[in-house]
Amino acid sequence: MIGFLISAMENKEKVMIYYMDSEGNVSQRVIRVVDINDNKMLVYCYYRKQVRSFKMDGILSCGPLKRSAS
């Protein structure tokens, strides 16, 4: 998973994540990774339209966004 996120950050690609917060709430987010350190990830969240921070251990799954045919 970390390799995928690093690649997405380097290529400035949007990513879909499923995230569980400290209270057990699960959310689906479309993000662009800005920075990754040991246990946190700084991202631009398209849902909140702002820079957010997510704990790495809260990410349940992640994957590429499907691109629509144009």
Image (spheres, rainbow, N blue to C red):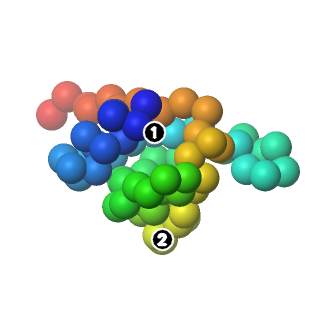
Tell me residue 19's x, y (percent): 63, 42
48 w.r.t. 65: above or below: below
23 relative to 38 in the view: left or right: right
As drawn, the label of residue 16 is 1
Quarter of the rendering occupied by the C terminus: top left
Q: Secondary structure at mark 1?
A: strand
Residue 46 visible within the image: no
- The residue that mark 2 highlights is 50
**Residue sitting farthest toward the left:** 70
Q: Secondary structure at mark 2?
A: strand
Q: In front here: 25 or 41?
A: 41
59 relative to 13 in the view: left or right: right
Which residue sits at x=45%, y=39%? 16
Instruction: Return the disc, 2 or 1, that comes first in the chain's sequence.
Output: 1
As drawn, the label of residue 52 is none
Identity, as a three-letter code, of the amino acid under mark 2: Gln
How far apart in space, not on screen, are marks 2 and 1 (Cα)? 16 Å
1 relative to 67 in the view: left or right: right
Residue density around tag 2, few if under 14, some if 14–19, many if 20 or more, within 10 Å? few
Tell me residue 45's x, y (percent): 47, 59
Quarter of the rendering occupied by the N terminus: top left
Tell me residue 12's x, y (percent): 23, 52
Confirm or deny contact between disc 2 and disc 1 (CB under 8 A).
Answer: no
Which residue sits at x=65%, y=43%? 58
Quarter-of-image position of residue 18: top right
